[in-house]
Image (cartoon, grey):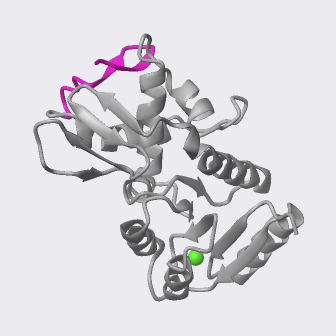
Amino acid sequence: MDKKGRLLIVEDEEAIRNGLVDVFVYHGYAVDIACDGRIGLEKSLSGDYDLILLDVMLPELDGFSVCNQIRSHSRDQAIIMLTAKTTEQDIITGLTLGADDYIAKPFSVRELVLRVEAVLRRVKKDHEVAPELLLGDWQIDTRNLCGKRRESADVIPFTRREIDILAYLHAHRERPVSREELLAEVWEYKRAMNIETRTVDIHMAKLRKKVERDPKEPALIVTVRGEGYRLTL
Ligand code: CA
């Protein structure tokens, strides 16, 4: 059968879980479920899923811990966090632990489906990026999701999303790239979708911590006021 992808839905609230299963089965996905964090983690680590929809508030093991442990095994696994809280801190925590995206409850089903499709399109496009990127004194291995400074022996891991951001900025290094453009091109969100650009800011802050000598005074990824981000090489 030509399924659009395999999803794992980790959600303890039965009504929400069943609703999500119905929606994604209807849209042509193969769907599996987990009712608590521990089972969710076990199933996630099998690596059988194209994308994991992960609730934050879960019995046994919360969604942040699940996300963190999945990420320590796989930097490639696509994860969208479902958060009941819309506090800045929860969103930052989720994205810092390596989730690809978050969606706040109560969410619109249509928006969730669009976000899942966007993340999966991005996963399939991975092979279009050059195997090595040279950014300043950084050598980035885009296949193995890691990089190092030329003079250093320390290999730093990157997430797929971070590599995608760097590759996009590199491909357009002659000009600043706006957050809206990054959302459209790297996250593949349709421009009409009303998605908060702070997703970009949070990823950028995390990325700068890795690649900048002084993240407070970025020299590699600079902010062009009113325009966006530009890579200086
Ligand atoms: Ca829950």
Residue drawn 27% across the image and 36% down it: 139
The span shown in magenta is 215-233
Side (left or right) of 17 relative to 122: right
In the rendering, at what x and y percent does residue 79 appear? 55, 61
Question: 108 or 180: which is nearer to us?
Answer: 180
Magenta stretch contains residue 160: no
Residue 226 belongs to magenta span = yes
Q: Is residue 185 left or right of residue 142?
A: right
Q: Residue at x 88, y 69 (%)?
A: 1
Q: Quadrant of residue 102?
A: bottom right
Q: Residue at x 69, y 69 (%)?
A: 7
Q: Position of residue 188 (x, y in %)?
A: 64, 37
Picture quadrant where residue 48 is located: bottom right
On the picture, is 59 further left or further right than 133?
A: right
Q: Height in image: 37 above or below 177?
A: below
Q: Is residue 54 left or right of residue 157?
A: right
Q: Quadrant of ligand 1?
A: bottom right
Rendered view: 221 above or below 65: above
Q: Is residue 216 above or below residue 175?
A: below
* Residue 183 x %, y %: 57, 34
